[in-house]
Amino acid sequence: MSGIAGRGQLPASGAVLVTGASSGLGRECALELEHRGFRVLAGVRRAEDGEKLLAESLHGRLRYALVDITDDASVRASAELAEREYGGLRGLVNNAGICVPGPLECVDGDQFRRQLDVNVVGHLGVIRAHLPLLRRSRGRIVNVTSGLGKAAVPFLGAYSTAQFAKEALSDALRRELTPSGVRVSTVAPGAILTPIWNKVSEAGDRVLDGAPPAVAELYRSAFQAFMAGNAQQALASRTTPEDFARAVFRALTDARPRTRYWVGADARRMGRLARLLPDALMDRRFSAITASVGAPGPLERQPG
Ligand SMILES: NC(=O)c1ccc[n+]([C@@H]2O[C@H](COP(=O)([O-])OP(=O)(O)OC[C@H]3O[C@@H](n4cnc5c(N)ncnc54)[C@H](OP(=O)(O)O)[C@@H]3O)[C@@H](O)[C@H]2O)c1
């Protein structure tokens, strides 16, 4: 299946950098893009993860680079490697990400900054470093966002903030880069079962443990029920990492790439509802999540 173009598609040729390729969607995407003909530079943070990917690679077109997207030196080194090894870059898939869950009142400044640093600021750094290579090839940037980039769900406020920001960054970038021929798309998945879901659950515990106990108690039972429901949703999801990888492939090879590729019925539905429903109706849809959040007792209420 190497590099053959269908109708309305460009050939899968040249090199693509995928960040966050050690696990989940990024790993699947790196292997699938290699399978479909691209040369793949898989961004991982640990050499052992890179070696594991190499062991799974079947076509000899994958190599890895050590890239922490919040570390400028490693990002610069990846651009230098792409230039040296491939003479440029045809695509960049900004997939790396973390999720800091929790009621916003419980998310401290460091946790909030970390969320934005990885999911937004880091990606812009990667884009900046690799744009000279992408401009030369009139290449593609694919930003991985989420259904939560259009609708902010309670208890995932920090993550939604980052996803909204990444959507805005993608819109502005797409408009800025049109004259240069570099095309920008987002790929927005709904729930897909990957290791992120275990990490989210642990991160949620850390957020509540770090909050003042009286504040954490206001939210604990509602938040725990929400997290359990979320985990169930991921377990029950029919959307697969392969679906995601196919959408990324299309964003890289469609002759006329869309601005956004939804992956999964839930993500598509969320995007549609956010576009069509007034805020009051969206609030009502989410109200069950927060129904049991503790209200202040009579003595704590502020007058007026
Ligand atoms: N799975 C879903 O349901 C879902 C839904 C919507 C959107 N998404 C988005 O899809 C993307 C991939 O998620 P996933 O489900 O595949 O999660 P995952 O399995 O946890 O993978 C996340 C990847 O990001 C990497 N990463 C984290 N911080 C990094 C940093 N500072 N620099 C470089 N890499 C870093 C991780 O590397 P390490 O292994 O080194 O930590 C890992 O490779 C994320 O952007 C996520 O927001 C996922």
Image: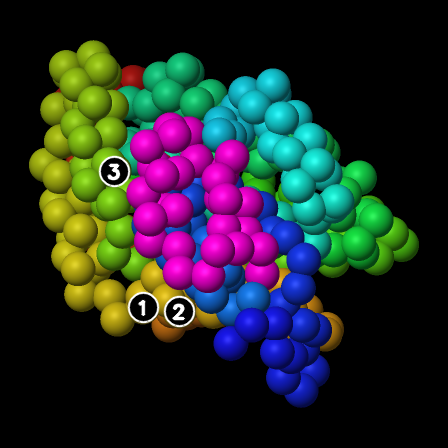
Q: Amino acid at mark 3?
A: Val
Rate crowding at label 1 as few (under 14), some (14 to 19) or many (20 or more) other CA atoms within 10 Å.
some
Whichever of callouts 3 and 2 sits on the residue coming sooner in the sequence is 3
- In the drawing, what numbered circle is on residue 113? none
Percent position of residue 283, x then y: 37, 53
What segment carries the magenta color? 38-65
Colour approach in the figure = rainbow
The answer to whether residue 96 shows anywhere in this view is no
Residue situated furthest bottom in the rendering: 7
Residue topped by disc 2: 243
Percent position of residue 190, x then y: 37, 60
Spatial separation of the CA atoms under disc 3 and disc 1 = 19 Å
Residue topped by disc 3: 200
Q: Nearer the viewer, residue 117 or 290?
A: 117
Pointer 3 with pointer 2, Cβ within 8 A: no
Spatial separation of the CA atoms under disc 2 and disc 1 = 6 Å
Dot 1 beta carbon under 8 Å from ligand 1: yes
Asked if residue 245 is among those painted magenta in the image, a careful observer would answer no
SS at badge 2:
helix
Pointer 3 with pointer 1, Cβ within 8 A: no
Rate crowding at label 2 as few (under 14), some (14 to 19) or many (20 or more) other CA atoms within 10 Å.
some
Q: Nearer the viewer, mark 2 or mark 1?
A: 2
Residue at 38% across, 30% down: 47
Q: Amino acid at mark 1?
A: Thr
Q: Amino acid at mark 2?
A: Asp
Residue topped by disc 1: 239
Asked if residue 54 is among those painted magenta in the image, a careful observer would answer yes
Residue at 74% across, 55% down: 139
Residue at 80% across, 56% down: 138
Residue at 58% across, 55% down: 39
